[in-house]
Amino acid sequence: MPDPAVVADGRRSKFLGGRSDGRRSTLIAIASTIVVFGGLGWLILNSPGWELLRQSFFNSRYFEDSWPRQVSAIAVNVQLFLFAEALILPFGLLIAVLRSLPGPVFFPVRAMATIYTDFFRGVPMVLIIFMVGFGLPTLGFDWIPNDPFIYGVAVLVLVYSAYVSEVYRAGIDSVHPSQDAAARSLGLNRFQSLRYVVIPQAIRRVIPPLLNDFIGLQKDTAIVSFIGVVEVFRQAQIDESASFNFTPYLATALLFVILTIPLARLTDWLVARDRRRQLAAFAR
């Protein structure tokens, strides 16, 4: 039988060694980071065109002047994002469900949903915004509102619903067919099985990729500037035209980073939590 004191000493030395290894790894990571970023900074600061780049993109005077207007304009982007997201979630789910309907009788429905998805994923968004923003008003219908903000929301919904529907469909396909079979054996029809069994499981599985899509949606709200909506990117263009300096674009980029980083960290946290749950379920 091993001596308890020897075992305790071994565990203590192992623990101390592990802590030491962790400290050494941290120091190596810090040193390598300083070397890499320090080298890049030295290379940029000593380049021949650094002074011109600093004056054109990193001018503090123009940054301070444009920043308040940029902050006010970003509210339009947030509104576009919230309105579009509220419509994209149910519309994308509807398209995914239509594409998942079985049987030959639903073939026309599946075909239309597939054509919609392929078209709006395949055509660049800038072309869609031009077709909607400048094409719909020419029809002359009184019931079509002549508001660029509404056109911008419509374009974001049309395009991102196609992407989100594919995320939903992947989640629906990931649910094992035995779940649907069990629901049907309990007397539920196809639609009840989708509503109460399949779709709730699918949505839980696709929350992280959905959040990734919405990070892209937040950035793509700038596309509405092409049809005249004065959001943060359009405001940067106005400021740049007035000052002949590109620093307002830096302010715009910083605002988008401030908006998207919390959502990106939330996505990482959800992915890590889902991975821990899967490992815990596998261990049982």
Image (tube, rainbow, N blue to C red):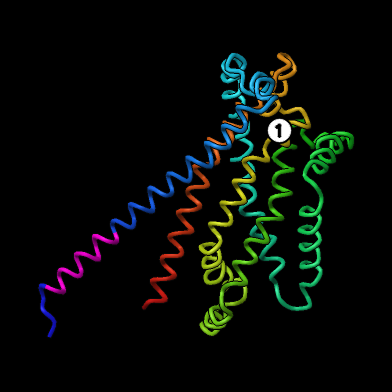
In percent of width and height, residue 190 lies at: 62, 75
Q: Quadrant of the N terminus?
A: bottom left
Picture quadrant of residue 219 = top right
Which is the main secondary structure of the residues drawn in magenta? helix
- Residue 11, magenta (yes or no): yes
Residue that badge 1 annotates? 149
The kind of residue tagged 1 is Phe
Rendered-image quadrant of the C terminus: bottom left
Judging depth in this view, the residue of 173 and 274 nearest the camera is 274
Where does the magenta region start and end? Answer: 6-18
Q: Is residue 81 above or below residue 196?
A: above
Residue name at image x 77 percent, y 68 percent: 110
Closer to the camera in the image, 5 or 114: 5
Determine if residue 206 is in view: yes
In this rendering, position of residue 45 left or right of residue 186: right
Q: Position of residue 22 (x, y in %)?
A: 34, 55
Quadrant for residue 276, please give it. bottom left
Image height of 228 relative to 262, above or below:
above
Residue 214 falls left or right of residue 106: left
The one of 122 and 16 positioned closer to us in this rendering? 16
- Residue closer to the observer: 114 or 58: 58
Q: Position of residue 39 (x, y in %)?
A: 55, 37
Asked where in the image residue 69 lies, by quadrant, the reply is top right
Q: Residue at x 29, y 61 (%)?
A: 18
Alpha-carbon neighbours of circle 1 within 10 Å: few (<14), some, or many (≥20)? many
Q: Tag 1's secondary structure? A: helix
Where 95 falls versus 139 (above or below)?
below
Q: Is residue 269 above or below residue 194?
A: above
Q: Is residue 235 visible?
A: no
